[in-house]
Amino acid sequence: MTVEELKVRLPLPELLVRLALFDYVPSVGTHRCPLHREKQGASFSLFRKAQGWGWKCHGACGVGGDEVSLLAMVQSCTRREAIPRYHALLNGPHPLGACPHSTHATSMRPRLEMQRQVAFPEDLGPGSRADLETVAALRQVDFWAVATMQQAGVLAFGTVRGERCWVVLDESRRCAEARRLNGTCFPGSGKVHTLRGSDKSWPVGLQLPRDRTRFFRHFLLVEGSGDLVAAYHWALLLGPNCLPIALLGAGMKRIHPEALELLRGASVRIVPHDDPAGRSAVDAWQLQLRRVGCTVYIFRMHDITLPDGRRGKDLNDTTALSADVAGKLEGLFSWK
């Protein structure tokens, strides 16, 4: 894995948290520098640039750089020595410990919102064409919608609870959900299995490789992995300039603060399930999104009539519609 790929997987704000230096708050301009004993004032700033994240101490240190240079200073090693340590941090919680010179780190640790380690299957991978065809058939969606998900890093395959599964996730690796590839329920459980350690406040699909999220200003927010596949299906057929994302369950009313920052000022179309839980969740989601300047639209599934005469309950129901009657979904992608 290259350094650039590491920076996508473990960007600077998350690296600071992983090292227990402090919890990065996007709305705060500067923080106390974790590299020197800064008891008063705040001289340490983070910023985005074309190549990724950068940092700068405007106080006693007077230095700056990227993730690798920060880790090298924290660990008192060379940049070359810091790179394998950076890679080790990606796969484990604080294996190198916090900065030994920062009293601020230990005092802040109890209130940190640490990124949990998701228990991904050891054989997690992109899968075969046959795997993609199986998911497309199971979900009754276009094959290329599933292939697009795989290429975007939103769909993978692996063994979960002894069963071959398809897994939805994204480059942040904060949250993932598995379903059996044979379409049946897990023994003694339901159709879906949220991987241990997942943070369900993170909208799966929001963080793409090489930070391509920034190219999207329209987002389609759905509920659950099944609707995420359906969202990619219609996004492919109707060709909208939007990125499908999903919160894995209506029970999660809170959206992760870093996710809200990525969505700030965007146009978000929410497709809730047409049930009490879905209606309750959408009220909470749209309130948080509007607080960060998002323009929010709600698409109600009960306005869709299915071929068998039933009213639509969720977006996954609509994959039974043929492309020639997709005009019924015109309101879903009418971005203003």
Image (tube, rainbow, N blue to C red):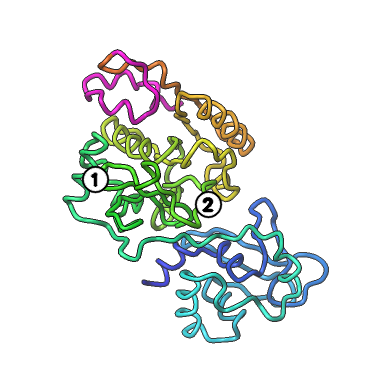
The residue at the point 37 percent across, 21 percent down is: 312
Q: Magenta: predominant secondary structure element?
A: helix
Q: Position of residue 31 (x, y in %)?
A: 71, 63
Asked whether the residues under the numbered discs 2 and 1 touch, taking CB atoms below 8 Å apart as contact, a structural biologist would say: no
Residue 114 vertical position relative to residue 139 in the rendered view, above or below: below
Q: Mark 1 belongs to which amino acid?
A: Asn
Q: Which numbered disc, 2 or 1, marks the residue closer to the eye?
A: 1
Range of magenta residues: 309-336
Q: Is residue 310 magenta?
A: yes
Mark 2 — residue? 199
Q: Position of residue 216 (x, y in %)?
A: 43, 42
Horizontally, is 190 left or right of 180 in the view? right
Residue 87 vertical position relative to residue 138 in the rendered view, above or below: below
The part of the image, by quadrant, that contains residue 333 is top left
The outermost residue toward the right is 40
Q: Secondary structure at mark 2?
A: loop
The residue at the point 51 percent across, 63 percent down is: 11
Q: CA distance from mark 2 to mark 1?
A: 26 Å
Q: Position of residue 59 (x, y in %)?
A: 74, 72
Mark 1 — residue? 182
Q: Position of residue 210 (x, y in %)?
A: 40, 58
Q: Quadrant of the N terminus?
A: bottom left
Q: How many marks?
A: 2
Q: Nearer the viewer, residue 171 or 121?
A: 121
Q: Secondary structure at mark 1?
A: loop
Q: Mark 2 belongs to which amino acid?
A: Asp
The part of the image, by quadrant, that contains residue 291 is top right
The residue at the point 32 percent across, 61 percent down is: 124
Horizontally, is 88 left or right of 186 in the view? right
Residue 237 vertical position relative to residue 129 in the rendered view, above or below: above
